[in-house]
Image (cartoon, coloured by chain):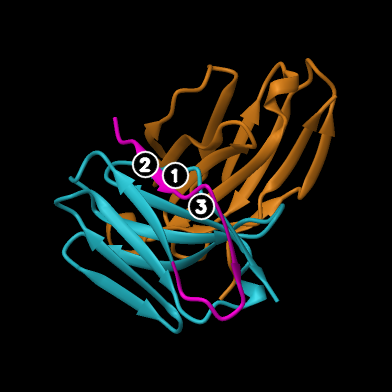
Amino acid sequence: KAGVTQTPRYLIKTRGQQVTLSCSPISGHRSVSWYQQTPGQGLQFLFEYFSETQRNKGNFPGRFSGRQFSNSRSEMNVSTLELGDSALYLCASSATFWVYGYTFGSGTRLTVV
Amino acid sequence: KQEVTQIPAALSVPEGENLVLNCSFTDSAIYNLQWFRQDPGKGLTSLLLIQSSQREQTSGRLNASLDKSSGRSTLYIAASQPGDSATYLCAVNNNDMRFGAGTRLTVKP
């Protein structure tokens, strides 16, 4: 059974550009969550999608957005990149989170220069 | 707002020691609590999941306990090995998953 797949693994972007990250959940999982991890702030919740609907959202500016497709794959977009957006972006999927918890992907390392 | 705290922030032990990592949370209305391991630059690997109705879970040398009423969980690692060196993260799930800052464990050969 394939795990959670995140692409790309590494990304270097210039300040002011935009970026799109992709996450393919475990087959059958309908919930996808996104997290930002930085040395200073630790793991911070961005948003969660369930069956194409945003179920929950963390405290990030509107430059951070996401969506989920009918096949449960999810994308996260960051517009007008800032140096502080450099981080490891992690995606997690779940069948029913209140029972089975979450499974994480390997992450996308974004560097903004 | 759920706050999750992990103590200690870092721990260094010689190989073979038994050790305990601590996690505390402020809102006891949780669905479950999950312990993860993270190696440098990698994603999170789930170690143990404890439902709110459970008191403990075991997997191999790992045992996690949950005291929901006091807002505490512990992760016990028996007979530690150098391969256990990693950052251990506690996460509680009530409406979204909130993480502690982690405990960085080093097991010296």
Residue A94 percent coordinates (x, y): 42, 58
The label on residue B4 is 2
* The colour assigned to chain A within the rendered structure: orange
Residue A49 visible in the picture: yes
Comparing labels 2 and 3, the label whose residue is closer to the camera:
2
Residue where numbered disc 1 is placed? B100
Residue A4 vertical placement versus B83 (above, below): above
Q: Secondary structure at mark 3?
A: strand
Mark closest to the chain's N terminus, 1 or 2: 2
Chain that appears cyan: B
> Which residue range is magenta in the image?
B1-19
Residue A30 counted in the magenta span: no
Residue A111 vertical placement versus B75 (above, below): above
Residue where numbered disc 3 is placed? A92
Residue B61 percent coordinates (x, y): 46, 81
Picture quarter containing residue A77? Answer: top right
The amino acid type found where label 3 is placed reads Ala
